[in-house]
Image (tube, rainbow, N blue to C red):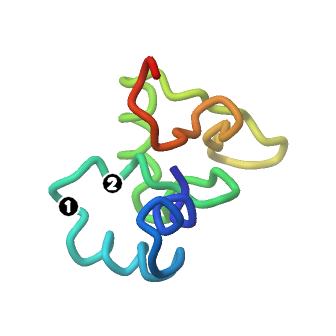
């Protein structure tokens, strides 16, 4: 989910508020699963996130001229429903 997706799912705040909460309290949760709307990896944590994406099989896409891949949101985005429903 993107930061905006989380805000919409919760029905409160916006992407910046979700980012603030994640920055303050996100260390105990799978923080790499909340991403930017353009699929870019979290600045300063790219390598750690990329390692997790590869372990979990998260769909990534190479972007011409970019050092790091991006998350393929069309394939990776979660809609908030339990899996299999």
Q: Position of residue 85 (x, y in %)?
A: 46, 22
Pointer 2 with pointer 1, Cβ within 8 A:
yes
Judge whether 30 appears above or below 5 on screen. above
22 vs 37, left or right, is: left
Mark 1 Cα within 10 Å, few/some/many (few <14, many 20+)? Answer: few
Residue 71, image quadrant: top right
Identify the residue shown where x is 52% and y is 55%.
35
Q: What residue sits right under mark 2 in the picture?
A: 31
Q: What residue sits right under mark 1 in the picture?
A: 27
Secondary structure, mark 1, is helix
Q: Position of residue 65 (x, y in %)?
A: 82, 47
Identify the residue shown where x is 84% and y is 41%.
64
Which of 58 and 75 lies nearest the eye of the viewer?
75
Mark 2 Cα within 10 Å, few/some/many (few <14, many 20+)? Answer: some
Which of 14 and 61 lies nearest the eye of the viewer?
14
Judge whether 76 appears above or below 2 on screen. above
């Amino acid at each position: 989910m993107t930061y905006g997706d989380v805000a919409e799912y919760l029905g409160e705040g916006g992407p910046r508020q979700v980012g603030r909460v994640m920055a303050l309290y996100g260390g105990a949760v799978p923080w790499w699963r909340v991403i930017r709307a353009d699929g870019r990896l979290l600045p300063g944590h790219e390598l750690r996130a990329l390692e997790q994406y590869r372990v979990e099989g998260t769909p990534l896409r190479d972007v011409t001229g970019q050092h790091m891949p991006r998350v393929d949101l069309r394939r990776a985005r979660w809609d908030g429903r339990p899996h299999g429903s």
